[in-house]
Amino acid sequence: MPGKVRLLVMSLIFLGVTNTLSAKEIELTSPDKHIRVNVKVGDNISYDVSYDSDLLMQDCVLALDVNGTVLGKSPKLTGNKRGVINETIDREVPTKNAQIKNHCNTLLLNFKGGYSVEFRAYNDGIAYRFITNRKDISEVKGERVDLNFAGNYLTHISKTPSFKTSYEYPYSHVKLDEWKSDDRMSYLPILVQTDKEYSILVSEADLFDYPCLFFKGTGSNGLVSAFPKYPLEFGEDGDRSLSILKEADYIAKTSGKRKYPWRTFVIGKNDADIVGNEMVYKLSRPCELEDISWIKPGQVSWEWWNGASPYHVDFKYGCNLETYKYFIDFASEFGIPYIIMDEGWAKSTRDPYTPNPNVNLPELIRYGKEKNVGIVLWLTWLTVENNFDLFKTFSDWGIAGVKIDFMDRSDQWMVNYYERVAKEAAKHKLFVDFHGSFKPAGMERAYPNILSYEGVRGMEQMGGATPENNIYLPFMRNAVGAMDYTPGAMISMQPEVYCSRRPNSAAIGTRAYQMALFVVFESGLQMLADNPTNYYRERECTEYITSVPVTWDETRVLQAEIGKSLVVAKRKGDKWYIGGITNDKERDINISLDFLEDNRKYKLTSFEDGINADRQALDYKKKEQPVNKSTTLILHMVRNGGWTGVIE
């Protein structure tokens, strides 16, 4: 069965109703005793969070307004149960680790009125959720998620002017008191750095049949929740969207008997803990697919970013048969399992059944199978919704997967759309890459045919995708799940000389930086965004990039400093890949290879910033050297630079 759980000690040990039901405060600690949640039941339900003796969050209030009754207002506690979860999970698509340790202490608080609140405390954070056991259909008018921090901390957010958003805004870095109540809200995840060594990553998990959570500032040390309303009426808005003409007075209409999404807080005593966490996966529902053997993560060659513009060829490039065969030949030669055919493969964006006659899609599918290369087709979400039987048609054609774009919403209707798509695609053995999407929130565990999500300020933004912004991605967006950043530029520039226009698309950052992103960033469908001609020209770099796996047995964070630098090591079989990136500052980082096996000799092949890479970003140096467990490497990275290598 998929998602097979191997129990080391699986003990949901309920210790029974306590004898102190009138108690106003109930404590829950993490297994290692460092993290403590103090839940307070009075006029409302609130909680404090501490790490050892350091208070991090205080008087955080939670409530749920269901059918006009506020669950959590004047609560009447009827009992509480404690438990322990201790298991090892084999992950279906292991973009970080093949096995995940799921160990936490649990606290279930039961209240009069048919509802409960469940808390979990892990060694790397806490989470809570509402559970209702009511017979009626629930109209959820709102959910109160008040977060109050113990100080005026530095907070990293991505501000959006409305709930209609592509989730691609650059990060803002503000003190909590600078984020005023009339300022723009932020989508998740949000990262809070305390004035000690701790950081707190705020997000959500097990999100089904419910809208995404947003936050607004208060102008003090707190955040308050905001949710998009349920849309009731739609109007025309072009070929890839709908306008919302009327909204309900509720955020969700749902079953009265259900578990609500987890509110998650990863707490890192050091910055590496944030990067290495698996909180969203652990808290989300298990795989719902009976057979996942057909799901094949991998790399994909993509034509949109580079304008489908091969050169040194004897045909006119563009959206035509010859160009796509060229992409297939390239993918086949370097062992890339897929190509994406983006906008233009169909005669009309509204009609998914009539290919562009210049493309000759049946011939490309046949040719791809001959070359062992699958085809992924791009679609707008609206076209999918209006033609929901296309999954069967695409499967019959021999298509491998779909890239669905421009959802740009996360109300309950749209969240349910994601699940309907994932379920229907899986029925016909198609994988999904969501673009114009909200962040991962657990659906990818239930439906592991969801290989990636965009919802990131990626390389599509050209000059808007800077290493200075990207350095936050492993600590924020990628820290909650797969991320389709679309790396792989072969034309690299430093920002003061940057210019880019198709067909000569370019990226900010050095060549070694672009190569390192394939190790650092996590995605079950990892793009090679540049022109195959450029990859042929830079063969030794391409051979390395295409050797990098997209799934891993083990991930170790070797060095991490939020907003400054990151170095990770990832193992696949008996090979270790190392990737390091920095912001706009040059730095040297010492890395120990003590994770290697004793008494074994290894060879390291590395790609490093060249001596002139701080000015000419294309400059890189390839090196080979013997290493072993006692070796210490000095990774030199220029500004906007990187370092990557493989140990075998």
Image: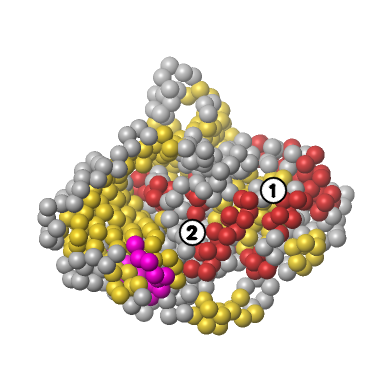
Q: Residue sitting at 51 percent across and 22 percent down? A: 602
Residue at the image point whose x is 27% and y is 48% from the top: 106
Q: What is the tally of numbered marks visible in this picture?
A: 2
Find residue 507 and name its label.
Answer: none
Front: mark 1 or 2: 1
Find residue 454 and report its image quarter: bottom right
Q: What residue type is labelled 2?
A: Lys
Magenta segment: 133-148
Q: Would you identify the image quadrant in which residue 465 lies?
A: bottom right
Query: Is residue 138 part of the magenta span, yes or no?
Result: yes
Decide: is 352 above or below 608.
Answer: below
Outermost front residue? 135
- Tell me the quarter of the picture where residue 79 sits: bottom left
State whether residue 532 is above or below residue 261.
above
Q: State left or right for residue 489 relative to residue 204.
A: right
- For the residues marked 1 and 2, what is the alpha-carbon distance in whole angstroms? 23 Å
* Front position in the image: 90 or 481: 90
x, y (%) of residue 277? 39, 46
**Residue 245 in the image, given as x and y percentages of width and height:** 55, 83
Residue 564 appears in the picture as rendered: no
Mark drawn on residue 400: 1
The C terminus is located in which quarter?
top right
Q: Does the magenta stretch include residue 601?
A: no
Q: Is the magenta stretch mostly helix, strand or loop?
A: strand
Within 10 Å of disc 1 (Cα), the crowding (few <14, some 14-19, many 20+) is many
Query: Viewed as shown, does residue 326 lie left or right of 33?
Result: right
State which tag comes first along the sequence, 1 or 2.
1
Residue hosting label 2: 439
**The disc labelled 1 sits on which kind of residue?**
Ala
Kindly tell me whether residue 64 is visible in this rendering.
yes
**Residue 13 location in percent, x, y?**
26, 42
